[in-house]
Image (tube, grey):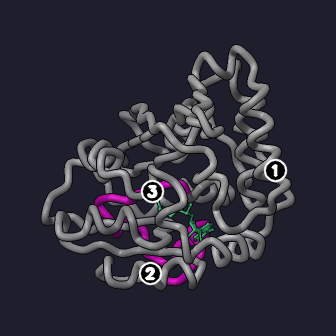
Amino acid sequence: MRTRNDVTPQTVVSHFTARAFKYDDSSKWCTDAAMLEAIVARLGLDQRQMALDIACGTGLVSRRLRGQVKALVGIDFTDAMFDQARPHVDALVKGSAEELPFAGQRFDLVVERQGIQFMNAATAVAEMARVTKPGGKVCLVQLCAYGDEDQEEYFEILRLRNPARRNFFRREDLARLLAEAGCTAVTVTDFISDEDVERWADNGAIEDERRQGIRDIYHSASPGFNRYHAVRIEEGGKIIDRMLFGIAIGVIPG
Ligand SMILES: C[S@@+](CC[C@H](N)C(=O)[O-])C[C@H]1O[C@@H](n2cnc3c(N)ncnc32)[C@H](O)[C@@H]1O
């Protein structure tokens, strides 16, 4: 895991306040039903479960879980994001995922998608584990580098795309975070999403200079990067990247 220490919670809130109006359309993966199915298929949902969606944003994960569980609670700290989640959760809490305002062992299922890259990841995952009941599941879904060959270029692309990003992951980081938080039976599954880089980079909160920097890296990508990302530059300049998400799940010992 690579970490930057110059990001404050205020930077994160400002970034997502600027992005909120177009967040749901800012990547294919955001609303991709196939990705949500891949997550849900591994959670073993049932109507007796209390579920928590960490960094719920506009509620895209919550919408898929709600109705499949007894109750779904969302937590986030950016008003412009979580205001959009209101219709899709049973309860919404404004707060920090690094200090969850819940008693221990309260939820059967605690899920985060694309949230812990903005946090002290170890603290946030430990908090997720703390509020999960024995036998319950903790799930992390994160964009990851494939490995040594692509990580330097990819981490630079991710840094340019999101100035509020603090952590850069590989799949093994997700497994380690869960294990260090006390989870057992940890699994990490790949989910591949072919993303239109221009749509993904045009997130409403970064300058042209950063978007150009991202294009430049794709245009001069190394053979190692290309081997994994299978970068396609189509007619008209559209860039397609085979992005990797890790879906990591661990169980709290019961
Ligand atoms: C990329 S969005 C992900 C939203 C949603 N989970 C999804 O999959 O679409 C990141 C969200 O994390 C929230 N966030 C970042 N750091 C947070 C923290 N420490 N506590 C609560 N929310 C946080 C932001 O406000 C933003 O809404």
Task: Please tell me in which quadrant of the rendered image residue 229 appears.
Answer: top right
Crowding around mark 3 (Cα neighbors within 10 Å: few <14, some 14 to 19, many 20+) is: some
User: How far, Cα to Cα, is label 3 from label 1?
Assistant: 25 Å
**Residue at disc 3, secondary structure:** helix
Q: Is residue 40 magenta?
A: no
**Amino acid type of the residue tagged 3 in the rendering:** Cys
Residue 30 is labelled as 3
The magenta segment is: 93-114
Q: Closer to the N terminus: mark 2 or mark 1?
A: 1
Mark 1, other Cα within 10 Å: few <14 / some 14–19 / many ≥20: few
Q: Going by the picture, which residue comes out furthest to the left?
A: 47
Identified by mark 1, the residue type is Arg
Task: Give the percent coordinates (x, y) of residue 73.
Answer: 36, 75
Viewer-proximal residue among 86 and 76: 86
Point out residue 91 in the picture as x, y percentages from the top left corner.
35, 83
In the picture, measured across the screen, residue 17 lies left or right of residue 249, that is right
Residue plotted at (67% across, 76% down): 18
Q: Name the residue that disc number 2 marks.
A: 84
- Tell me if residue 129 can be seen: no
Instruction: Tell which quarter ligand 1 is in.
Output: bottom right
Residue 4's tag is 1
Q: Which residue is drawn at 24% across and 69% down?
A: 66
Residue 184 - label: none
Real-space CA distance between mark 2 and mark 1, rounded to the nearest whole angstrom: 29 Å
Q: Is residue 25 above or below residue 194?
A: below
Looking at the image, is 165 positioned above or below residue 41? below
Q: Of discs 3 and 1, which sits in the foreground?
A: 3
In-front residue for pair 203/189: 203
User: How many numbered circles does the render carry?
Assistant: 3
Label 3, ligand 1: CB separation under 8 Å: yes
Q: In which quarter of the image is residue 71?
A: bottom left
Instruction: Indicate whether 254 appears above or below 205.
Output: above
